[in-house]
Image (spheres, grey):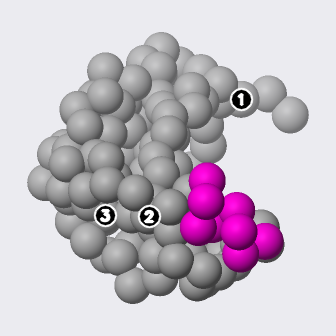
Amino acid sequence: MTVNNADKRKYSLIITIVRKGLGSCVIDISKNSGAEGGTILLGKGIAEESIYQDILGMDFEPEREIILTLVQQEDADNVLDAILSGAKLDKPGNGIAFIIDVKNHLGITHLLEKWTGKKGGF
């Protein structure tokens, strides 16, 4: 399968992992800083209790929300900074966030149309 890369912009995926119940807050923070939205997945940590307390500084509550936010690469650092301050990820136990560069993408035609102003996204 060939991916149509007519849109030459680069994209990043911000992955944020927080306690269950905080995902909506992270989505709001992301949208207020330029993201179009995101997806919340439910997860469960499997590390031993001592790992959570000693290394991660988190209470042992294995349920987590994983927020996936696709943004244009040029906006990724601003959105990540907003998540850091808004969700207080600089405090132990509040969660983590990181950025992964996206090589190819499919199915974001509505965003490409908005970002490029062209029907069909290209």
The part of the image, by quadrant, that contains residue 49 is bottom right
| Label 1 SS | loop
Residue 75: image location, x then y, percent: 28, 29
How far across and how far down the image is residue 81, in percent? Answer: 25, 37
- At horizontal 26% and vertical 60% (from top left) the residue drawn is 87
Cβ atoms at labels 2 and 3 below 8 Å apart: no
Q: Judging from the image, what secondary structure is the residue with disc 2 in?
A: loop
Crowd tier of the residue under label 2, counting other residues whose Cα lies within 10 Å: few below 14, some 14–19, many 20 or above: some
Label 3: state its secondary structure.
helix
Q: Which residues are magenta?
A: 48-55
Q: CA distance from mark 2 to mark 3?
A: 15 Å
What type is the residue that disc 1 sits on?
Answer: Val
Residue at screen point 70% across, 62% down = 51
Image quadrant assignment for residue 71: top left
- Looking at the image, residue 122 sits to the left or right of residue 119; the answer is right
Q: Amino acid at mark 2?
A: Gly
Q: Mark 1 — residue?
A: 3
**As drawn, is 32 to the left or to the right of 41?**
left
Q: Nearer the viewer, residue 106 or 12?
A: 12
- Taking the magenta stretch, the answer to whether it contains residue 5 is no
Q: Can residue 68 be seen from the camera position used here?
A: no
Residue 61 is situated, as x and y percent measured from the top left of the image, at: 58, 84
- First in sequence: mark 2 or mark 3? 3
